[in-house]
Amino acid sequence: MLRRLALDIGPLRDSRPFRNVFIARTVSVFGIGMLAVAVPVQVYALTGSTVQVGAVSAAEGFALLAGFLWGGVLADRQDRRRLMLRARTASGIAFALLALNAFLPSPSSAALYVLAAWDGLATGVAVTALLAATPALVGPDKLVAAGALNALTVRLGSMLSPALGGLVVSAFGVGWNYAAAAAGTLGTLGLLTSLPKLEPAGRDEAESHPLKSIAGGLRFVASHRVVGSLMLLGLLFMVAGGIPVLMPAFAEHGLGGGPTTVGLLYAAPACGAVLASVTSGWAGSVRVPGLALLAASVAGFVLLACTGLARHPALAVAILFGYGFAASVEEILRYGLIQSHTPDSHLGRVNSLWAAQETGGTAIGSLGAGALGRYLAPGSAIVVYGTVSAVLALVLALTLTTLRTATLRPEPDR
């Protein structure tokens, strides 16, 4: 029983190329987390302006979104190995230049805007190329396991890397934070160099305009009943990701807590997601992953709605832990289904749209949750947000019959 639940590390054990990409990805996640701490700290120290802190973050975010979309087009036209190498090199150079700027007697705040955007663009391209390359590095029966390993890396990185970045900044300064990220990023290039060529199949759109190529990816998503349904459901989850903006007010007015409570509310979903990843051994062998994914979606949103009813911090944290667990199960299964149902010629663009969906959807969700919080008490707003999401997920579960019966080994004509 325990063996069936344990995280399947088969892709790491059996595929050296995937192992190399996994290590490089882990280093990248930690570098991004360290950057997320160092840049706002340095901008605020130089300008004393929270507006400029937000502006730099926005510049990096827009560049990341552009990197996802551009990377999707490139990943369906070029050798994905070479694309990863170029993008990671560009990112490492950006970290190195950030370090040099930080060590100057008078660091340039304008350089922070440029280099943060540069790194965001390079990161978007690298992530998209990595996602598109993964199916070629593992067998079709290991796609869910690979997705769980990638999800675990992202979750642990998002939990640990900001703390690591904060410690480095406090002990040595922002310059050494950037230098450490640069050394780690450039140090992984050897791992990527050893990968085999990862040419996309069926590059029939190589000469088309990039916007036409992106439109082709959108047409594929809209026309494919499984992939389109997965994207629709994923958008619902990403929009629900705006709930964290309500947590400070909910902690104060609904739970009678302070900053410590807020921190626990933020951490609980990530902790639940980590547990889901390390106990995901069953996910690769589930007979009806589409149905399991839909069930996890509805359960997750119900738990989210219940969070708003909690009146004790411990209960709210426990419910959010369960929400994070359910959301991670949905994410792991969705990853496996998207990769297995998308032809290699479209993997770059489909994965770029998925990544862009996550980035943009969370921002939209944050705006929606913030607006709802203006008219309702924080707890009530969470209940409404979660209930509406649960109802929509249930409607999708009842109507998307193709997704309910989808498997990880689709028929060739699908």
Image: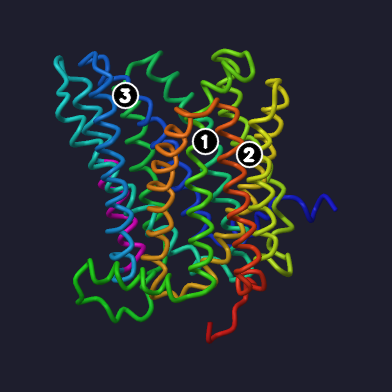
Furthest residue in direction bottom, as rendered: 413
For the point 62% across and 65% down, which residue is it?
142
Q: Mark 2 points at which residue?
A: 304
Q: How is the image coloured?
A: rainbow
The answer to whether residue 19 is magenta is no
- From mark 2 to mark 1, how far is it between C-alphas? 9 Å
In magenta, the rendered stretch is 79-92
In the visual, does 28 lie left or right of 40? right
Q: Name the residue under label 3.
A: 40
Q: Where is residue 331 in the image (x, y as percent from the top left)?
A: 58, 53
Q: Do the residues labelled 2 and 1 touch (CB within 8 Å)?
A: yes
| Up/down of 139 relative to 158, above or below | below
Q: Nearer the viewer, residue 228 or 408?
A: 228
Q: What residue type is labelled 3?
A: Pro
For the point 49% across and 60% down, which residue is it?
232
The answer to whether residue 87 is magenta is yes
Q: Where is residue 56 in the image (x, y as percent from the top left)?
A: 25, 31
In the visual, does 234 lie left or right of 351? right
Q: Which amino acid does label 1 sit on?
A: Ile
Front tag of 2 and 3? 2
Task: Say which quarter of the image contains residue 220.
Answer: bottom left
Per the image, label 1 sits on a secondary structure element best described as: helix
Q: Which mark, residue 409?
A: none
